[in-house]
Image: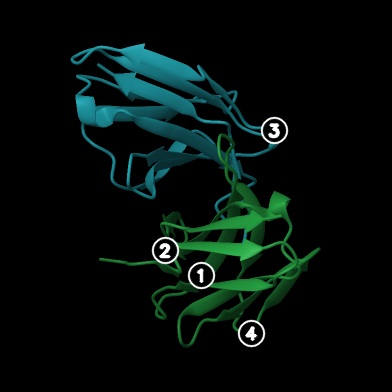
């Protein structure tokens, strides 16, 4: 059974704090890793698709790194803002066609 | 707005009934994916279509079926509904099945089976 694990499950930080979460995935048969941001009552919004070991992607204050050999990816948010409050999902692309999602890290940023 | 549309937004029905959920992909996208989000579960991949053909299957029950039409919209049919089928059903689309293609999610259909 393929398992994609995310930690922590939830995180509460103060506005201005920087934070990071982890996504662990199988290190064999790697094709791609996706990160999504999911706000309550909305649909998941794509952040990054990462395909190469050592990949680093950045979008504003959010960045991600990828280590396919050891099977993990980190998502970093620099200077968290209340509008960053959401669930952050990672998904492992299995067999080129199926995305296996983790259960997410729920981030709450307090002003 | 991702450009993916889903109808209806909400659906309430009874056990044993059959419903159809509809998805229109982003303009130009050939791949459509269906996902189920139940209480306390992560997003579960159900099925994928590419240009009208079934391409991959996930944890889709035999009571569920889907198709993609020539105009690329897709329908997910759920029959003999049970209470446990109550969930949020998402459709996503991408330009193709190639590795590295972003999947864009629709707003979802919330199904409640009473």
Q: Which mark is residue A94?
A: 2
CA gap, disc 3 and disc 4: 31 Å
Q: Which mark is residue B3?
A: 3
Does residue B95 lie above or below B61 as drawn?
Answer: below
Where is residue A62 drawn, in percent x and y?
72, 66
Tell which tag, 3 or 2, sits nearer the viewer.
3
Q: Position of residue A109 (x, y in %)?
A: 64, 57
**In the rendered image, which residue does mark 4 sit on?**
A54
User: Is label 1 in a helix, a strand or a loop?
Assistant: loop
Q: CA distance from mark 4 to mark 1?
A: 14 Å
The span from disc 3 to disc 2 (Cα, nearest Å) is 25 Å
Element under disc 3: loop
Mark 4 vs mark 1, foreground winner is 4
Q: Residue at x 64, y 85 (%)?
A: A54
Q: Which chain is cyan?
A: B
Within 10 Å of the Cα at label 3, are there few (<14), some (14-19), or many (20+) other Cα atoms? some
Q: Which mark is residue A31?
A: 1
* Left or right relative to A74: residue B58: left
Q: Is residue B108 left or right of residue A83?
A: left
Residues at badges 2 and 4 in contact (C-beta under 8 Å)? no
């Amino acid at each position: 059974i393929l398992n994609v694990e995310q930690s922590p499950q939830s995180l509460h930080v103060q506005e201005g704090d920087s934070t990071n979460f982890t996504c662990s995935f199988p290190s064999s048969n790697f094709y791609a890793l996706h990160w999504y941001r999911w706000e309550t009552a909305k649909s998941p919004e794509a952040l990054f698709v990462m395909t190469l070991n050592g990949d680093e992607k950045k979008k504003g204050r959010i960045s991600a790194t990828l280590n396919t050999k050891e099977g993990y990816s980190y998502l970093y948010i620099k200077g968290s803002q209340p509008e960053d409050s959401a669930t952050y999902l990672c998904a492992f692309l299995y067999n080129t066609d199926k995305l296996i999602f983790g259960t997410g890290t729920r981030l709450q940023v307090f002003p | 707005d991702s450009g993916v549309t889903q109808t209806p937004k909400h659906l309430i029905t009874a056990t044993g009934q059959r419903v159809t959920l509809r998805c229109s992909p982003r303009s130009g996208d050939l791949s459509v994916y269906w996902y189920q989000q139940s209480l306390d579960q992560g997003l579960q991949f159900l099925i994928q279509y590419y240009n009208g053909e079934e391409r991959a299957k996930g944890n889709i029950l035999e009571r569920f079926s889907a198709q993609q039409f020539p105009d690329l919209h897709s329908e997910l049919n759920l029959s003999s509904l049970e209470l446990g089928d109550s969930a949020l059903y998402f459709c996503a689309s991408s330009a193709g099945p190639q590795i590295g293609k972003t999947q864009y999610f629709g707003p979802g259909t919330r199904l409640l089976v009473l």
